[in-house]
Image: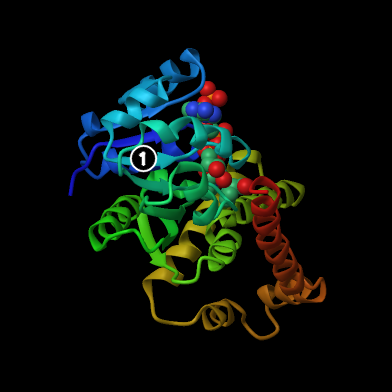
Amino acid sequence: MVRNIAFIGAGNMAGAIIKGLIAGDYPAERIRATTRSAESAQQAADKLGITVGTDNAETVRWAEVVVLAVKPQMLKDTCEALAPDLNQQLILSVAAGIDTRALAQWLGDDLAIIRSMPNTPSQVGVGASGLFANPKASDSDRAFAQQVAEATGLCAWVEDEALIHAVTAVSGSGPAYYFLFMEAMIEAAQKLGLDAESARTLTLQTALGAASLAAGVDTPVDQLKRNVMSPGGTTERAIHTFEQGELRELVEKAMRECAARSESLGRELTQ
Ligand SMILES: NC(=O)C1=CN([C@@H]2O[C@H](COP(=O)(O)OP(=O)(O)OC[C@H]3O[C@@H](n4cnc5c(N)ncnc54)[C@H](OP(=O)(O)O)[C@@H]3O)[C@@H](O)[C@H]2O)C=CC1
Ligand SMILES: O=C(O)[C@@H]1CCC=N1
């Protein structure tokens, strides 16, 4: 299914999705985007190979699908300015925290609105998105949103919108947790004596290998972990150190904080 898609915002997240779509052979001439400044529009156009302008109204009138990809703090003003130019386009919002009820209030009550919580690995085709559709979205709207999400990776639907907060804590923000872990491993590897390049490549390949293995076999991750841990061996000492440092509790706490921030962001910005 090919529809004219307008991205309002062409930053990190929109750029990741657009790159994924184009890599999956979605026709570039059916994708346009806007930014605030002519300078950033030019930069995004050069980077993405699509038309990028600064005229939201014109771009939205051209579109059949409008993807809201500005920061949540900008969303209310952006939506209210767009509302007069909407004519039953499907709305896809990637903004954290802002629910479909608020979006409908700002954009128009009758609109089909689908929220997507994607992540930046979408730009290399390994994204993970959570999707929620309001009741106005048709099966074909849902199919289109799923097609966009699957062009950049995999997706899962939630039927309770509140679960988008949980999706944000897992996959939306999740890449940053792994990047932090990689950063910490690279730093520690250098303290153990490896040069910077070896520290980096060995860390990244290990992350890639572990994720590929976990995704590629049916074995549960705790068993995969045990497969690395020889009794009385080296890994056991490292894992024991993580457990003693209450890594699990810390991960749960961090993810609860993330979901709570998604909720409070929504409350703050939709009052
Ligand atoms: N980054 C991530 O990992 C994820 C982000 N998200 C969500 O994606 C959304 C965008 O985040 P991100 O891509 O990181 O943000 P960026 O700051 O990278 O991009 C924001 C973009 O919005 C543009 N913009 C701002 N105001 C307007 C406007 N009124 N009209 C048109 N364009 C406008 C900016 O243009 P200019 O440069 O000219 O200001 C810029 O291109 C957020 O709502 C975030 O919650 C969701 C999942 C993951
Ligand atoms: O940090 C944020 O608010 C956005 C939403 C999910 C990932 N980045």
Q: Is residue 81 left or right of residue 89?
A: right
Above or below: residue 260 compared with residue 46: below
Q: Position of residue 13 (x, y in %)?
A: 48, 41
In this rendered view, identify the residue nearer to me: 234 or 268.
Answer: 268
In this rendered view, identify the residue nearer to me: 174 or 87.
Answer: 87
Q: Residues within 10 Å of mark 1 (few under 14, many from 20)?
A: many
Q: Position of residue 242 (x, y in %)?
A: 75, 71
Q: Position of residue 72 (x, y in %)?
A: 59, 42
Tell me what residue is drawn at x 71 percent, y 74 percent: 239
Q: Is residue 181 visible?
A: no
Q: Is residue 173 left or right of residue 145?
A: right
Q: Position of residue 134 (x, y in %)?
A: 41, 61
Q: Is residue 159 visible?
A: yes
Above or below: residue 228 compared with residue 75: below
Tell me what residue is drawn at x 22 percent, y 29 percent: 29
Q: What number of labels is visible?
A: 1
Amino acid on which disc 1 is placed: Val
Above or below: residue 4 compared with residue 237: above
Q: Which residue is mark 1?
A: 66
Residue found farthest to the bottom: 231
- The colour scheme applied to this rendered structure is rainbow
Q: Is residue 265 left or right of residue 214?
A: right
In this rendered view, identify the residue nearer to me: 12 or 83.
Answer: 83
Q: Is mark 1 within 8 Å of ligand 1?
A: no
Q: Answer with the quarter of the image where residue 68 lies.
A: top left
Above or below: residue 241 compared with residue 16: below
Q: Answer with the quarter of the image where residue 163 lies.
A: bottom right
Secondary element type, mark 1? strand
Residue found farthest to the left: 1
Tell me what residue is drawn at x 36 percent, y 40 percent: 66
Residue found farthest to the right: 245
In this rendered view, identify the residue nearer to me: 72 or 224.
Answer: 72
